[in-house]
Amino acid sequence: MEKLVVFYGGKSVEHDISIITGLQVMSVIKNEYELLPIYIDHAGLWWTAENYDDPNIYADFLALAKKPKQVSIEFGLGCVYVFKKFKKSYFKPAAALICLHGANGEDGAIAGVMQMANIPYSCPNLESSAICYDKELTKIVLKDFDIPVVSSITKNIDQINKKEIIKKIGFPMIVKPARLGSSVGIVVCKDEHELEQAIECAKLYDFKLIFEHFIENSREFNCAFCLNENMVISSNVYEVVGQKFYSFDEKYLTDKPKTQKVTSKKLEQLIKKLGEKTVLALECEGVVRVDFLMEGETLFVNEVNTIPGSLAGYLFGNLKEVAIELVENAKARFFKNEQLIFKYQSEALSIFKENCFSNKYAKK
């Protein structure tokens, strides 16, 4: 049975949602792999525990977890190790399944760590993740590929000029932290007073803010895509219903269905075509979810989620198949990257050694 590490939790405002994703994924693949769950707490420390699958323990992990053990990583050797009393045990996984939403996950940080550790990982690479996590950079890239995005301007919090923003965007507008997800810190405002409040809210989460035209009476759609070797597989397309703005509470704190499957084949194909173009432009390998807005007949790409909640299994219809595909995808990408040359023979060190004593800087 192959070994697999699963990262969840994280030093992020999306910590709780990441726990849910991790637990849901592990519940459907626990008989397929030998799992090492790695819970990352709010301080960024890595842990594992025997009763990891009990959601109640995450209210106070060290107090409620059964036999908690700290986990660390061995860079370059393709393994992690678990601290036990007076010793440590090594665990060499076939891949890492990344369920970390938000900071230190979707921003590419964990991809960079896995890359340096020589562990295949399920999410897009560092570069793609970083671009998709930053809403400003996402828009820049998509515009370059003639992919429509909603008009906006971006400002650092020490450069905000409300009159300029109002003149360029107008009301209603939506204010977003540039680097965050799950609708946290996002506020719709209709006048200058509400704009001031929105800025105060958003800047708690990021030093860079997006001021975007808010499309009233828009339609919102979700579709997931799996990119492997430039082949794109798309999921079902769902429309968000019942709310003008899909807030954090609407996404996660209610049990009422808030999406419905799109039945129009023409609209479905339009969304899938634009989504495929988007993931190819952003080089989003693995499984990602793209969120779309529609104003009249015009379709916009709103956001790209490189580690979607519960890995978008509900969009594909089978979370277990999605998780297994992510693991196989991760291993295939790792093998492909290993074919590249990372060593280059040169005479640079020999020349340096010969000339170092004559170098004027070396004499100082």
Image (cartoon, rainbow, N blue to C red):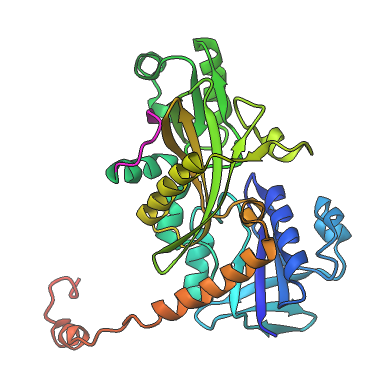
Camera-side residue of 268 and 114: 268
| Quarter that holds the N terminus | bottom right
Left or right of residue 351, residue 244 in this image: right
Q: Is residue 166 above or below residue 36?
A: above
Task: Kindly report the secondary structure that dominates the magenta region of the rendered protein.
Answer: loop
Quadrant of residue 98 within the rendered picture: bottom right
Left or right of residue 143, residue 104 in this image: right
Question: Where residue 255 appears, x then y in whole percent?
Answer: 79, 39
Question: Where residue 194 appears, x then y in whole percent?
Answer: 56, 15
Q: Is residue 120 visible?
A: no
Instruction: Give the magenta-colored segment's residue range.
Output: 146-154
Quadrant of residue 220 within the rendered picture: top right
Question: Where residue 155 appears, x then y in whole percent?
Answer: 39, 30
Left or right of residue 224, residue 209 in this image: left
Quadrant of residue 270 within the rendered picture: top left
User: Is 107 colored magenta in this rendering?
Assistant: no
Q: Is residue 224 above or below residue 352?
A: above
Q: Is residue 309 above or below residue 343?
A: above
User: Is 152 colored magenta in this rendering?
Assistant: yes
Residue at 71 percent across and 74 percent down: it is 36
Q: Is residue 3 visible?
A: yes
| Quarter that holds the C terminus | bottom left
Question: Where residue 358 appears, x then y in whole percent?
Answer: 11, 80
Camera-side residue of 182 and 258: 258
Q: Is residue 318 above or below residue 144?
A: below
Residue at 65 percent across and 67 percent down: it is 321
